[in-house]
Amino acid sequence: MNLTPKQLKILQLIRDCRVRHGYSPTMQELADQIGVSKVTVFEHVEALIKKGALTRDPNKARSLSIADGVVVPDEGRPLRFPLVGKMLREGYKRKVQLAPQPHAATAVGLAIAADPEAGIFVREAITRHFGVWREGDAGRDKVFDAILDKGTVTDSGDVTIERRYQPVHAVGHLRFLECSEIGGDGRPEGDLTPWGDIFFPYDPRFLAENELYQRSSERSHGLCEEIVERYHYGRDGTVTVTIQNQTRGYQRSFVLGAPFELAAS
């Protein structure tokens, strides 16, 4: 995908804004940060949508988001070998896509795999923090919940984490991301990479609805649901989350980063 420097900058600004705040910048905010007119930004955004790098919901404000499968490089760290990267991601999923040093990690891994008689074994470890934005102070604040900490090591390579809570909203909007550092205030810092959003109906009245994002700001008045989230980090780098309304007995499962829901029951 060929991008101009300004188009790449727009993608970076949209990615960073969604990771830090949970929504995308406006056209005027992009124009102010880049130093061009709002009309120029609009033209670049339309070009990025046509190239398949951006998506937008025309009926929702601040809805620009990076298209599935598009990795936005940082300045000074451009993407290389796109075909090799694509083939590796198909086999090893997001572990390759989100590695902070993908080329070095890939080279070491291929060298070890090419010589099984060398007796070199790799112990599985998580190299970045992974978490989700949650509502704090009864919905008046946003808190980053670090679900998987950098440096976590297990003999099997698999990690399972559980969270329990009673929600304040009718529909949960979970925004996942990974980062290289956690600041003193508990917020993500350093190299930030979004993993995508999940919407889950805490209120059983909305189980059959397809556009759950339209309900994500509604409060759950009088709702006393017990919600359980279970996260499984696999050896292939994928994270599977199962969200269950334990009070009502239904659940949904997702593979984070995949464009589809895994299962519902």
Image (cartoon, rainbow, N blue to C red):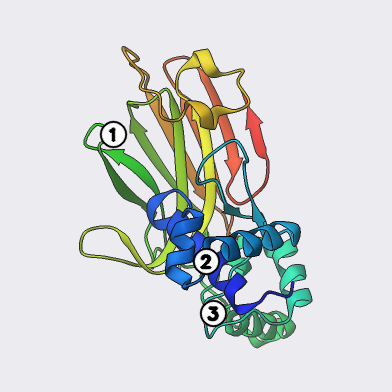
Mark 1, residue position: 139
The vertical placement of 13 against 248, above or below, is below
x and y, in percent, of residue 218 in the image:
40, 24
- In the shown orientation, is residue 138 left or right of residue 249? left
- Residue 37: image tag: 2
Mark 3, residue position: 101
Give the residue displayed 74% in from the left and 83% down from the top. 114
| SS at badge 1 | loop
Which image quarter holds the N terminus?
bottom right
x and y, in percent, of residue 178 in the image:
45, 60
Mark 2, other Cα within 10 Å: few <14 / some 14–19 / many ≥20: few
At label 2, the amino acid type is Ser
x and y, in percent, of residue 207 in the image:
57, 18
Residue closest to the eye, 153 or 100:
100
Mark closer to the chain start, 2 or 1: 2
Residue closest to the eye, 63 or 221:
63
At label 1, the amino acid type is Gly
